[in-house]
Amino acid sequence: MPAHYSAELEQLRSTFHSPEINDTEARQQLLQCCIDGLQIQQVGLWHFADHDLLRCQLLLDKDYGFSQEALLVDRWSFPGYFAALDQKKVIRAVDALNDPATRELADLFLKPFNIKSLLDVPIYADDTLTGIICCEQTAVTKHWTEEEVAFAIALADLYRLRFS
């Protein structure tokens, strides 16, 4: 993993262990680290409300800051996306509008928010999928490198260690 990713992760790890940081601040720091490390436009932290419903807990846009959007994704409306989450460790969609795993999201998310590429990394607790970190590139496509995927997976692991 490149040195700048390791440095970002070490700083976040240190922050996560600080007794002065609360859970909200920890989540914000994680998303900021993701934006800075991957150099992307926005990132969301999504949690399963139940096995069939993903809810956006926190969203960070590089230009507009943090928000708690009331965004929901359900298994019935997006069966292909959920099937991909169920089967894959990571969803790496360079062309999110045409990727089989993400194209169902086009009308509700991709087109309205001008999202071109997605990198969705699962968060597990005791082998159960509990959420995802959704990395989003807008305006132009992004070819996710192996190093970027490894960095995002490491962020999800740090999140799991802090919150499970």
Image: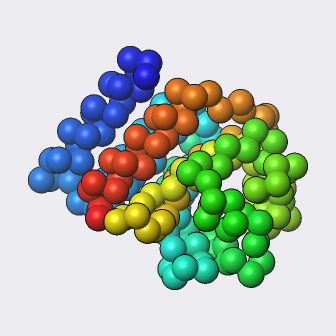
Q: Would you identify the image quadrant in which residue 86 lies?
A: bottom right
Q: Which residue is at a point 62% across and 27% down the rendered structure image?
A: 145
Q: Which residue is at a point 34% across and 34% down the rendered structure image?
A: 9
Q: Quadrant of the N terminus?
A: top left
Q: x, y percentage for residue 127?
A: 40, 64
Q: Is residue 71 visible?
A: yes
Q: x, y percentage for residue 31?
A: 45, 48
Does residue 26 sit above or below 138 in this rendering? below
Q: In which quarter of the image is the C terminus?
A: bottom left
Q: Which of 137 and 78 is in front in this view?
A: 78
Residue with the most extreme top position: 3
Q: x, y percentage for residue 103?
A: 83, 57
Q: Would you identify the image quadrant in which residue 163 lies?
A: bottom left
Give left or right: position of 111 versus 26: right
Tell how many labels: 0
Q: Can residue 112 be seen in this view?
A: no
